[in-house]
Image: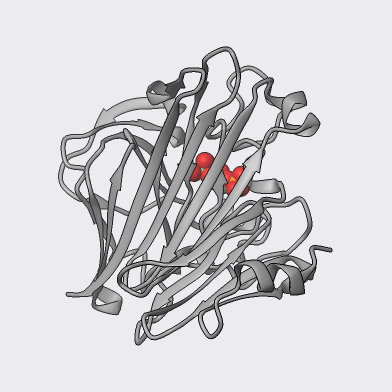
Amino acid sequence: MIELAALNAHHGIPGQLTFIEGPGGLVVAEVTNAHASATLVLQGAQMLTWAPIGQSPVIWLSRAARFVLGKSIRGGAPVCWPWFGAHPEDKTKPAHGFARNLMWQVSGSAIDPDGAPQVKLRLQDSDQTRALWPYAFTLELSVTAGDALLIEMSTTNNDDKPFTITEALHTYFAIGDIHQATVTGLDVARYWDKTENFAQHTQSGPVKFEKETDRVYQSDSETTIEDPAWNRRICIAKSGSASTVVWNPWIDISRKMEGMGETAWQGMLCVETANAMEDGVRVQPGGSHVLMARISVEDR
Ligand code: TA6
């Protein structure tokens, strides 16, 4: 068990950032201040919750989520890295890579100039990661939880050979009603449809939801979730990202999916800041790449 007292002494910020023992004994960084409340679990550097003060949750966390060491938690913002989806050659390797299942180290904390607490977590290669992916790397995730939520993930290649990653901030958003929600900002973008064996299509107008939706869009644009049921919109600005993944499992998959809950699909939607499919990122020895998502919410 990570020593909570030492973590709080080194990285805690009195009244704003505290490390606590969360469900399943997992260590959680808890932010509560005048701007927002948020939680981030050290396992997987996974955001669990975030809401500006006065708003209902913006990041969705399943009520049926299981908190188990070494397993991704259903909801929040799991980190998919160094591959997104199934491993391209070896389906026995973990889906969405290994970063979401491993314990990260706290590498820093601060208050940004707007008064928002910032936490930095780091993951480095180990025997365990090199058995799955044979490269030396540093992966760093920085979260700034204020009126807006800023997530920056930087990949550094510490190896002597280049590598290519696919990746995603697999963010689950809380919405009032999937039947009424739409996603704008993807008009005319090309996408691969996983529900049609990755057939390619072009988006026309806003994305609407009438059935299982699982798509990788080629787009570096900002997207907006329009949520008439809760009378608000969620804006997702990004950089370092050539793909946006849009996912809702709908009824049948939700029933079978671990930690999801039977009816939960009606109140969630994933819009993921990613580099996937053809848009993997090549990182040279000594080089870095930064993926950034900035999430904000406003009334409609
Ligand atoms: O991003 C969409 C997706 O790749 C879907 O195909 C779906 O399986 C989902 O992620 C969840 O994956 P997980 O491995 O967390 O169950």
Q: What is the x, y in percent for residue 163?
A: 53, 18
- The image shows residue 298 at horizontal and vertical percentages of 22, 73
Above or below 153: residue 260 = below
Give the position of the C terminus as an image quadrant. Answer: bottom left
Please name the residue shown 72% across and 51% down the image.
103
Looking at the image, which is closer to me, 215 or 101?
101
62 versus 32 height, above or below: above
Q: Is residue 220 shown left or right of residue 166?
A: left
Numbered disc total: 0
In the picture as drawn, the residue positioned furthest to the top comes out as 161
Residue 239 as seen in the image, left or right of residue 49: left
Q: Is residue 3 visible?
A: yes
User: Which of 6/279 is in front?
Assistant: 6
- Dividing the image into 4 quarters, which one contains the N terminus? bottom right
The image position of residue 111, as x and y in percent, is 42, 70
Judge whether 36 appears above or below 163 on screen. Answer: below
In which quadrant of this rendering is ligand 1 seen? top right
Q: What sort of colour scheme is used for the picture?
A: one colour
Q: Is residue 275 visible?
A: no
Q: Residue at x 58, y 21 (%)?
A: 88
x%, y% of residue 189?
21, 34
In the image, taking residue 81 as reference, residue 90 lies left or right, namely right
In the picture as drawn, the residue positioned furthest to the right comes out as 1
Quadrant of residue 245 within the rendered picture? top left
Residue at x 51% of width, y 31% of height: 156
Q: Nearer the viewer, residue 280 or 200?
A: 280
